Amino acid sequence: MASQGTKLPIVTRTAEGSRSTRRLRRTGRVPGVLYGGELAPLAFSVDARELRHALARRGAVLEVGLDGATQPAVLKSAHYHPVRGETIHIDLLRVNLSVAIHAVVPLELSGAEEAPGTKEGGVLEHVTRELNVEALPTDVPENIVIDVSGMEAAATMHLSEIEAPEGVEFLDDPDDTIIATVTVPSEVVEEPDIEEETELVGEGEAAEGAAEGGDQPEGGAEES
């Protein structure tokens, strides 16, 4: 659970366009905007290294520090460089720790190799990889791990079979949301080996030639 806040010091910035933003990134800082609550949106920048460490615990409440004061916030969205993968912009959302929020939580599977269905040759497919949940900011989990070690061949696991963590409510449809399936591959009919097939054809042609040769008179000459 994300019960511990993670400190994230920020400084205000003036949004001056893409040129100013690129110059800011070259100094090792990431631009962002803080939304929510009764306060106006705030443009800020944060040290890229400190941001990376703060976001390592997904779902954690961030204690955003500004001018000696802190306020709780959560990551609303993040944009990444398409090649280098580094964070180039973030949006944070102010939160009230006593009011539940909606969040998207990663879904992980455990025990796939031990499942009877996979041991029998089936393929376990991870269908749903994220869940929409509602919980207090401090109760939003970093991830949800589902045990699939008991899945049989041709089995399907729905969200309705999963118990939500304490303090967390699933928002996705429990009957329509498929967590995982175990599919059984269809039987493959083995084709005859090329060499064996060639030998069979050759034997057939030899037999046919022998039968035609038996109709000719001995000596091979025609009667006068």
Image (cartoon, helix red, strand yellow):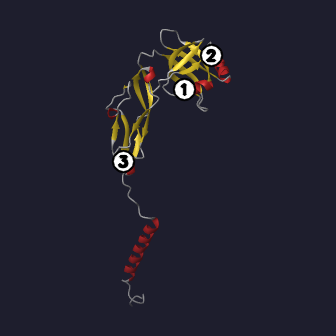
Instruction: Measuring from the top left, give residue 96's x and y in whole percent.
Output: 45, 14
Residue in the foreground of this view, choosing between 222 and 192: 192
- Amino acid type at image mark 3: Gly
Q: Is residue 124 left or right of residue 88?
A: left
Secondary structure, mark 2, is loop
Instruction: Measuring from the top left, give residue 138's x and y in whole percent.
Output: 45, 22
Crowding at label 1, few (<14), some or many (≥20) Cα neighbours within 10 Å? some
The label shown at residue 130 is none
Secondary structure, mark 3, is helix
In the picture, which quadrant includes the N terminus?
A: top left
* Residue linked to disc 2: 17
Q: Mark 1 and mark 2 in contact (Cβ < 8 Å)?
A: no
Q: Mark 3 and mark 1 in contact (Cβ < 8 Å)?
A: no
Q: Residue at 68% across / 22% down in the picture?
A: 27
* Residue linked to disc 3: 117
Q: CA distance from mark 2 to mark 1?
A: 26 Å
